[in-house]
Image (cartoon, rainbow, N blue to C red):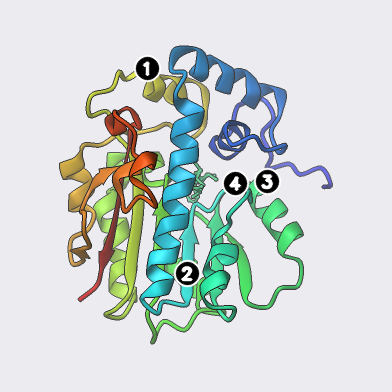
Amino acid sequence: MGERSDIDLTRPSAARVYDYYLGGAHNFAVDREMARQAIAMWPEVPLIMQANRAFLRRAVEFCAARGVDQFLDLGSGIPTAGNVHEVARTANPEAHVVYVDSDPIAVTYSRTILGDDRRTAVVQEDLRDPGAVLAAAGELLDFARPVAVMMVAVLHFVPDGDRPEDVVAAYRDAVVPGSHLVVSHATHDGQADTHQELYRKRTSTPMTMRSADRVRSLFAGFELVEPGVVHLPRWRPSSPDDVGDHPERFAGLAAVGRKP
Ligand SMILES: C[S@@+](CC[C@H](N)C(=O)[O-])C[C@H]1O[C@@H](n2cnc3c(N)ncnc32)[C@H](O)[C@@H]1O
């Protein structure tokens, strides 16, 4: 990877810190230091991230099983095990996926591993600019057919001032009935706010945790599929053993909606 002026090595990045939590190798000392600080305060953090990744896999399988073969993965992150195109293609080898992230390392590494795969594209854009994202994604995806819009562990990086409901609505209005919205979101329901504080002070992507009601409001114009907005392990677990005794400790909410 050549040197890039837009990679900030002086501050942790949400994408690289997340990569560290998942056991990835695309992070720097500054990211690892912040991740260790978070784990010291909140030892469950890596497990929560793994539960998030497991939700992403189940949600892609769910959409694919309902015939969706186009995925717009917003805030896709640094590629790791179980990327959207890998999961989607086990159901349908023709599935098309557009990955979108604002982080230069996430984008560069995604492009490196996807190479010249013609059924995937990687776009460096801010998801808060739906016009730019949709124009770029439209080069690969056919918006006249259903699309799964994925916003997994990313909307908590959109502060209230940037009107997350309006951002989601712009994507909703761009997709046809039968499309799906997949969301996971950090929540403070029953949790201390220390994690939120750490991201606010240290990273360029401060974190806004939201309640279950607020996450539900992101689904305006979608019908929530069962079981609605629930803690990560509770969303259609592969086995009851995956849920454990305290799913609320997984301080993330998950839901999938379908545009009627
Ligand atoms: C915690 S990671 C989640 C990665 C993946 N969606 C997952 O759940 O495994 C959040 C990602 O969102 C990206 N991100 C944050 N704000 C963004 C924005 N406004 N536009 C695009 N990407 C954003 C970060 O760069 C990071 O890669």
Q: Secondary structure at mark 4?
A: loop
Report the side of 102 relative to 221 (left or right).
Answer: right
Let me know if residue 155 appears in the view: yes
Q: Amino acid at mark 3?
A: Ile
Report the side of 150 relative to 118 (left or right).
Answer: left
Q: Position of residue 109 (x, y in %)?
A: 71, 52
The numbered dot on residue 194 is 1
Let me know if residue 127 appears in the view: no
| 63 and 214: which is toward the camera | 63
The numbered mark, 3 or 2, whose residue comes first in the sequence reads: 2
Residue at numbered disc 2: 71
Residue at numbered disc 4: 103
Residue at numbered disc 3: 105
Q: Amino acid at mark 2?
A: Phe
Q: Position of residue 94 (x, y in %)?
A: 58, 81
Residue at 43%, 31% in the rendered image? 206
Front label number (1 vs 3): 1
Q: Secondary structure at mark 3?
A: helix
Give how far apart the Cα atoms at labels 1 and 3 are: 27 Å
The numbered mark, 1 or 2, whose residue comes first in the sequence reads: 2
Q: Are marks 1 and 3 in contact (CB under 8 Å)?
A: no
The numbered dot on residue 99 is none
